[in-house]
RNA sequence: GGCCCCGUAGUUCAACUGGAUAGAAUAUCAGAUUUCGGCUCUGAGGGUUGGGGGUUCGAAUCCUCCCGGGGUCACCA
């Protein structure tokens, strides 16, 4: 049986045809789809069939229909041992035998729930991070990176080939500002000579530029210029603009300095990415792509998708779609942001022909831009334009308000990770069971815990919502947190270490404790959940599932003895179950980029 | 002002995309360990889902009008 079918052959899938056959024989109707759901905790049963939707095709009292289907199922399915009806809800009791069989046939390993991509299947490209090269990464980038990376992992686990990419905003006036400041005030400083991380060094000069600029504006105003005039005439601004012109005309000295300083930044970014645990398969640089797209606009103009205004600029009219008119080419024939994004999208498909979709991880302030971009690409008739997604996310707020890099109220990405590690160290020193660990191993563990806390905290919330981030108080190590999950995993590993007997063979039939049944049900739901998370690009779904799983395991652990039970078969089964839950935790966490320790 | 997103226990988040009596965590209070890791478990209190109207068997979810917060309406990226 192919892997995919096997993974989805869960109880819903088994009952589906039987219920349909039952409805056919009782009421003589063909029903297309049925709505199954997990039975709520307050009711008896395991699986619930919602009868209301059937009323469209079957006239009658929902409770009576439920009763009839229930009776039919008890007679015709070996797995349904009983049922009860509450209003239009048919609650079915599923036999222990079914769950045990399901568990025994499960592939129990670290790849639990994953589907291998088909060799000739469609690929998807996920863009995230997309930094500017004039300042270091901050908390907002962390949310972006974690989301993009996690969504990539989820898509890959759901059976798609994934290319992770970023577009680096490496050109423009902002980088010229850092360059000018470095020329004036740098005295030849380099990351090597100062020991400062490259992105931080360049970022410092960006701040330095801004200080100088403000002073110059002030003195110009004192000399009698009006504020608006002064803000345009500050000498250092004019220098930066002149430098941009030189860069665009390819002036060798300017380009050389630009390359050098950008290289410093990239080395700094690479360190941050590595610390954060994210990576990329390919990169795009705006200096390469900012001129793309013009020929496609020209082509679209011929085909009547765009139109030309009297001044020569080119536009698209989206008023029929409820949007505005949007410029796609300036009067002087140069590209705008939109032109460039059109060109870059097309370029990516050309570079990787197996791609049939793109995901852009970009903040929600660009919602409108992407709406327009996607619409334009659709109008241009690209087939892959049906599969464009803007993974939009809300801002990260601080208790003091917005982050502003110029005012120094940003939370730096590197600093934050260090702080998380420090907190983990403090707590673990008190509570950890780390006898025999070397200092190096301990430090590695603190890093895993600190980062796990940060990642889980950010990924568990719906991307659309703003996050209020209090670095001091928000990160907790108890309750619904990353370390809570890691702790449970570590505890399972502790049991496996102590289980010094062979537990690999499946045990035969035995009665299940309700807590055991709960755990198997959760395992059963995972592969489908993974597909849903992939479709909705939602790491939060995975995070919340992981938490449910861990909670259910802790409850099981508390009420049911594992190694202490006298019955050998039960002991074996419970160790197997623990192991399987461990695999599931590890698998789910890996989709969030969270590592799990064997001790902590 | 037009358009888009958000509003759920004191606080931070859920709610299987229209399903049952809206759930967790946290904080507070009360309990549990001859056991495998107490960073655990069990329980209590805490809600007019911002407000009004509508759609239907059924609404936090869909429609509509208000209120509040944010974003966006650049020939910037």
Image (cartoon, rainbow, N blue to C red):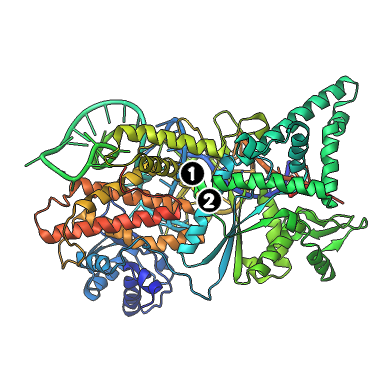
Residue A495 lies left or right of residue A253; in this view the side is left
Does residue A146 show up?
Answer: yes
Residue A413 lies left or right of residue A581; in this view the side is right
Q: Position of residue A445 (x, y in %)?
A: 38, 43
Identify the element where label 2 is drawn.
helix
Label number found at residue A474:
none
Q: Nearer the viewer, residue A295 or B57?
A: A295
Identify the element where label 1 is drawn.
helix
Q: Distance of mark 2 from mark 1, alpha carbons?
A: 9 Å
Q: Position of residue A161 (x, y in %)?
A: 52, 67
Residue A495 lies left or right of residue A8; in this view the side is left
Q: Are marks 2 and 1 in contact (CB under 8 Å)?
A: yes
Q: Position of residue A277 (x, y in %)?
A: 49, 50
Residue at 25% over, 55% down = A578
Q: Which residue is mark 1?
A: A458
Is the residue A381 above or below the residue A391 in the image?
A: below
Residue at 61% over, 30% down = A409
Q: Position of residue A187 (x, y in %)?
A: 73, 32
Q: Quadrant of residue B6?
A: top right
Q: Nearer the viewer, residue A6 or A595?
A: A595
Q: Quadrant of the C terminus of chain A?
A: top left
Q: Which residue is mark 2?
A: A147
Q: Residue furthest front?
A: A193
Does residue A90 show up?
Answer: no
Mark 1, other Cα within 10 Å: few <14 / some 14–19 / many ≥20: many
Q: Residue furthest right?
A: A310
Q: Quadrant of the N terminus of chain A?
A: bottom left
Determine the chain carrying the residue at label 1: A
**Between disc 2 and disc 1, whose residue precedes?**
2
Mark 2, other Cα within 10 Å: few <14 / some 14–19 / many ≥20: many
């Amino acid at each position: 049986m192919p892997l995919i079918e096997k993974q989805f052959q869960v109880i819903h899938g088994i009952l589906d045809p039987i219920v349909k056959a039952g409805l056919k024989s009782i009421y003589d109707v063909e029903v297309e789809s049925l709505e199954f759901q997990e039975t709520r905790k307050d009711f008896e049963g395991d699986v619930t069939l919602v009868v209301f939707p059937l009323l469209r095709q079957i006239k009658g009292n929902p409770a009576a229909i439920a009763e009839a289907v229930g009776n039919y199922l008890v007679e015709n399915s070996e797995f349904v041992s009983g049922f009860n009806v509450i209003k239009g809800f048919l609650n079915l009791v599923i036999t222990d035998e079914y769950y045990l069989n399901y568990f025994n046939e499960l592939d129990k390993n670290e790849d639990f729930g994953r589907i291998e991509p088909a060799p000739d299947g469609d690929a998807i490209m996920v863009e995230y991070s997309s930094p500017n090269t004039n300042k270091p990464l901050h908390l907002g980038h962390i949310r972006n990176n974690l989301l993009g990376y996690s969504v990539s992992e989820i898509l890959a686990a759901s059976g798609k080939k994934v290319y992770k990419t970023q577009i680096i905003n490496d050109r423009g006036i902002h980088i010229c500002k850092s360059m000018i400041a470095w020329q004036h005030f740098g005295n030849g400083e380099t990351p090597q000579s100062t020991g400062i991380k490259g992105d931080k060094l360049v970022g410092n000069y960006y701040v330095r530029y801004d200080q100088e600029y403000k002073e110059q504006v002030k003195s110009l105003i004192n000399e009698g210029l009006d504020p608006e005039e002064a803000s345009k005439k500050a000498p250092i601004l004019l220098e930066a603009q002149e430098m941009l012109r030189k860069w665009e005309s390819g002036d060798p000295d300017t380009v050389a300095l630009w390359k050098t300083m950008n290289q410093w930044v990239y080395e700094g970014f690479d360190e941050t990415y590595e610390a954060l645990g994210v990576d990329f398969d390919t990169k795009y640089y705006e200096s390469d792509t900012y001129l793309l797209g013009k020929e496609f606009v020209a082509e679209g103009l011929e085909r009547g998708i765009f139109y030309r205004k009297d001044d020569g600029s080119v536009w698209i009219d989206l008023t029929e779609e409820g949007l505005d008119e949007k410029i796609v080419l300036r009067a002087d024939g140069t590209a705008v942001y939109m032109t460039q994004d059109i060109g870059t999208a097309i370029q990516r498909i050309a570079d990787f022909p197996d791609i049939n979709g793109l995901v852009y991880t970009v903040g929600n302030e660009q919602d409108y831009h992407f709406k327009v971009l996607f619409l334009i690409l659709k109008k241009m008739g690209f087939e892959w334009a049906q599969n464009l997604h803007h993974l939009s996310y809300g801002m990260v707020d601080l208790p003091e308000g917005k982050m502003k890099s110029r005012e120094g109220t940003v939370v730096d990405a590197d600093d934050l990770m260090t702080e998380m590690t420090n907190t983990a160290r403090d707590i673990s020193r008190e509570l950890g069971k780390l006898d025999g660990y070397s200092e190096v191993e301990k430090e590695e563990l603190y890093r895993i815990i600190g980062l796990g806390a940060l990642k889980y905290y950010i990924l568990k919330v719906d991307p659309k919502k703003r996050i209020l981030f209090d670095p001091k108080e928000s990160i907790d190590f108890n309750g619904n947190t990353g370390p809570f999950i890691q702790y449970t995993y570590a505890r399972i590993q502790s049991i496996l270490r102590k289980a010094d007997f062979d537990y690999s063979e499946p045990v035969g039939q035995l009665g299940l404790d309700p807590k055991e049944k709960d755990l198997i049900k959760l395992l059963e739901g995972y592969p489908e959940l993974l597909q849903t998370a992939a479709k909705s690009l939602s790491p939060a779904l995975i995070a919340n599932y992981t938490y449910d799983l861990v909670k259910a395991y802790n409850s099981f652990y508390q009420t049911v003895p594992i190694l202490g039970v006298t019955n050998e078969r039960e002991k074996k089964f419970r160790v197997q179950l623990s192991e399987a839950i461990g695999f599931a935790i590890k698998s789910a966490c890996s989709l969030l980029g969270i590592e799990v320790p064997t001790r902590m």
